[in-house]
Amino acid sequence: MDQLEQTLQELGRKVVENNLWRQRRCFNLIPSENTPSLLVKLCEISDPSGRYAEHKTALKKERAALEGTGALKGNQVYYYQATDFIFEVEERLKEEFGKYINATEVEPRTISGQMANEVVFKGMVKFLFAGKEDFPKLTDCGRMTTVMNNNLNYGGHLSAQPFGALFNFVKGDVVNFPLVENNFYRTDVDKMLELVDQHRPPLFVFGKSMFLHPEPVKPLREFIDKTDGYYPVVMYDAAHVMGILGAHFQDPLTEGADVVTGSTHKTFFGPQRGIIAANMPKESPLRKLWTEITSRAFPGSTSNHHLGTLLAFLVATMEMNHFKDEYQAQVVANAKAFAKACAQHGIPVEGGEEDGFTSTHQVVIRVSRFADGKEIAHRLEKNNVVTNYQALPDDKTFYHPSGIRMGVPEMTRFGMKEMDFDNLARLMADIIIHNKPVGDEVAEYRKQFQKMHYCLELEKTLQIAPAIFESLFPSSEYFQSVAKALGQL
C-alpha cells in the first residue's frame, strides 16, 4: 500500500467514525444545522457540482444579437455552454421557492446567508445612489445614513453589524431595535416607532441568530405607510427561521417586509446556500432595487454559484413544499415542549415563561449557575449532546457566556415528538446540573430516532439512487460495487 492510499484509508475511517457519531449516536441540537435527505445529498455530488453557469439579464439591444446563438435562455445571457439543464433547474427553483415564501421574485445564486445580506446592502447603495425623488439620500461618502437592526449582544446577527457585512454601506453607528424590559428577546414596538420617527433610517434589518419570538414587521409597515414622504426598505433576515415561515410562525412578506434573505440549511433543510426573495414586480417603485440586487448577485458577488448545491436546493424546496405544514407544526410544538421540559427539570430557560419561552425552533438556557457556558457545551458534547454556547443579553463578554443555544429541527426530522424531548431534557439535566456521565444512555436513546422524515422515503430514494450512481460511475465494476453497497443499506 503506498503512502497516498494509506493516508486516504485512514481519513476514510475517520469520516465514517464521524458520520456514525453525528448521525446515529448523538443528538444534534445546534439551531443553525440540519441534515439534508439522501436524495438532496446525491444531487450535491452529481455532475453540476463541477460546472459553471454564469449569466445575467440580457439588455434589450443584446437580445437581437444573441437570438439563435444558444447563449440566450429566457431573458438571460449565459457565458458557458451546456447549461440548458442548469437553466431549467434555476427557473424551477425560483418557481418552487417563490411558492414556498409567497414571493414573485427570487434570486437563488448567493451561496450563503451572509452573502445574501451583503448583496442586498450593495443593491441598496446602488439603488439610493440613483437619487430617486421619493427615497432617502446617501451621505456625501456614498453610504446609508443609518440602519436599524438587532444588537449583536441581544441576538442580532454579525452580518447586520457595521463591523460585519454592513461595513462599507453605512456611515456610522446603527440604531438598535429597543427591547421589552422584562424580556430582552422581544422588541418594544412603541419605543421602536419613536426611534423610527426620530432617525428615519433608510433600511431596517429584522432577524437574529438568537431568535425566539416574531419580529414586529406589521406594526412597522403600518407606521411607514401612514408617514408622508418616508420610503425606507424593510429587510427580514430569515436565516434561522426560513423553514418555519408561514402559518406556524410569521409570514414577513405578507406582513410588510420588502425583501427576505436567509440561508437554506437551518430550519430549511437544504444544502448550505443563501437566498433572496421579494415582491417587486415591474410596476413596483422598488423594481429598480430588485434589478440592482440581481446584478450584485452576478457579477457583483458570485462567479460560480455552486451548481451542485443549486440542484440539491431545488430538491429540498420540493420536499419542503410537500411537507411544509406538518414539519413546521411539529418543529414549533417540539421547541415549546423542549423549553418547558428543561424548566421542569431544573434548567433555567430564557425567553419569558409567560411567552411560552419560544415561538420558533430555538430554546435558550441559562447555565451560569452550574458552570461557564463553554464548559457546559463541552460537557454536553462529551455526553453525545451537541449544542453551542451563547452569550446572553446581560453577559459582559462573549468569552464567558452564560447560555446554551439549542434548536429542534434536525431531531424533529429524525422523528422526535414532544414527549421525546422531555426525556432528552431529563438526560441533559443530569449532565448540566449534576455533572453525571450519561453518554452511553444518550447514545442508546438516540437509537430510537434513526429514520429521516419529511422527505422522500428511503425505499423510494433507493429506487432512484442506482441510476444516479451509474451515471456518475459508468464503469460496470464501479457501478456494481456501489449498487451492492446500496443494497446492504
Image (cartoon, rainbow, N blue to C red):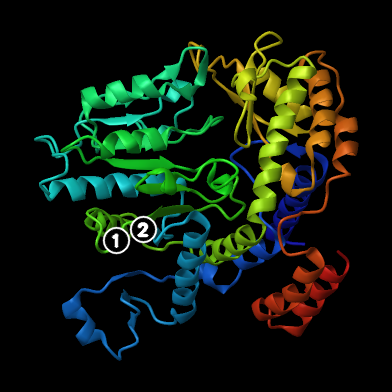
Q: Count of labels shown?
A: 2
The three-letter amino acid code for the residue at tag 1 is: Pro
The three-letter amino acid code for the residue at tag 2 is: Thr
Badge 1 element: loop
Near-viewer residue (192 or 440): 192
Q: Is residue 202 above or below residue 401?
A: below
Identify the residue at image location x=74%, y=42%: 411
Rendered image: mark on residue 302: 2
Q: Is residue 454 above or below residue 464?
A: above
Identify the residue at image location x=43%, y=41%: 237
How far is disc 2 from disc 1 in space, using C-alphas? 6 Å
The quarter of the picture where residue 187 lies is top left
In the rendered image, the quadrant that contains the C terminus is: bottom right
Q: Residue 128: where, in percent of width, then height?
A: 17, 46
Rendered image: mark on residue 66: none
User: Do the residues under discs 2 and 1 have CB atoms within 8 angstroms?
Assistant: yes
Rendered image: mark on residue 299: 1
Identify the residue at image location x=24%, y=30%: 146
